[in-house]
Amino acid sequence: MKITFWGVRGSIPAPGPQTVKYGGNTTCVELRTDENKLIILDGGTGLRVFGDHLMSRKEKINTNILLSHTHWDHICGFPFFIPAYIPGNSFTFQGPVHYEQSLKDVMVGHTQYAYFPVRVEDMAAEINYKDLKEGTFELEGLKVHARYLNHPVLCLGYRFESPRGKIFVFGTDTEPFYNVFGTDGDPEAENIAVELNERIVDFVRDADLVVWDAQYTPEDYKMKQGWGHTSTIQAMDMAMQANVKHLSYTHHDPNRSDAAIDKILEDSHEYVKSKGSSLKVSAATEGVTIEL
Ligand SMILES: [Zn+2]
Ligand SMILES: [Zn+2]
C-alpha cells in the first residue's frame, strides 16, 4: 500500500508562510493498493489539488471516496474536484449514515445554489452514494474494517489490511471516549468508556501505520474536551498500547505553525523514549508518501 497526503489540516484551511512545511489544505489522503487501485479518503480542500494531479495523468477514474464524516473540512474540496466534471469518470461516496439525512442528501445539500453555483447533479461524472455503518467489507482487494469514533457527529475510522498482511488505519476526527455526564465514581459508568476505548485500541492493534487525529496538545485538550479531537499524548498512549509501528499525527490545528508542529514532534519523541517504546511518531505532511 502507498499512502499519500494531499491535505492534513483540521477544521479550516490554513495557507500562509507559517504552514508551508506541513501544508494548509484540509483532509484528503490517497491510498493506492499494491495493484495500484485507488481509494480516496475524505474530500477536504486537498482533494482539489489531488484532482488536478489526476487530471494531469489523463486517466479515467472509477473510484471510491470513503468519508470519515461530512463536516465541511472533510467534504468542501469536492465541488472543486475537476475529475467529477469529466464524462466517463465515476465515483462512489461511502460514509456514515446520518440521523435524519442520507449521505446523498448531505453531499447534494452542500452544493445548493445558496452555497455554490454548480449542483452535484450537474456534474458530468457518474456519482453514487453508499451509506456505511460499522462493519467489515472488501474494497479494491483490501479488507476494510469501519469503526465508529468519538466525534460530535457520526464518524467512521477505517482499517485496511492488504493481502500481504500490511495494516493501515485512518482515524480522524475523534477523541477518547468518556462519560459526558460524569461517573460519580460509579464503576459501571466508568467501565463503559473504558470498554469503548479498548475497542479503539483493538481497532488499531498491530498496525504498520496509523494516521490519527492529534489536533491538540495536552494543554489544549484540558480546555477543549468534548470538541471531538485527540491530544498528542492520548494518540501516543493508544498507539503504544496497541503495538503500532508508526503513528502519523493529522488534522493539525489551523493555528499550529510549522515550528509549533516541529516542537510537538520533538516532545513526542522524548515522551515515547521515556516509555521505552519503539513507536515511530511523525506528522502527516502534504505531498509525502508512506509506503507499506
Ligand atoms: Zn475535521
Ligand atoms: Zn469533524
Image (spheres, rainbow, N blue to C red):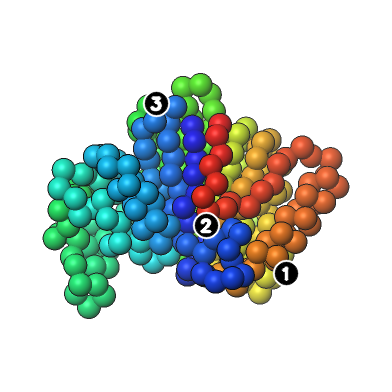
Residue 292 horizontal side relative to residue 12, left or right = right
Where is residue 57, by image quadrant? top left
Q: Residues within 10 Å of mark 2 (few under 14, many from 20)?
A: many
Residue 65, horizontal then vertical, whole percent: 34, 47
Question: Circle 3 is placed at which residue position?
Answer: 35
Q: Amino acid at mark 3?
A: Glu
Q: Secondary structure at mark 2?
A: loop
Q: Quadrant of residue 90?
A: top left
Q: CA distance from mark 2 to mark 1?
A: 21 Å
What is the secondary structure assignment of the residue under circle 1?
helix
Spot occupied by residue 193 in the image (x, y as percentages of width and height) = 60, 54
Between circles 3 and 1, the one closer to the viewer is 3
Name above or below for residue 64 compared with residue 69.
Answer: above
Horizontal side of 92 relative to 183 (left or right) equals left
- Front one among 256 and 68: 256
Of mark 3 and mark 2, the one earlier in the sequence is: 2
Q: Which mark is residue 8?
A: 2
Q: Which residue position is annotated with label 1? A: 219
Which amino acid type is marked by label 2? Val
Q: Residue at x 66, y 48 (%)?
A: 282
Residue type of the residue flagged with mark 1: Glu
Considering the numbered disc 3 on the image, is that residue within a helix, a strand or a loop?
A: loop
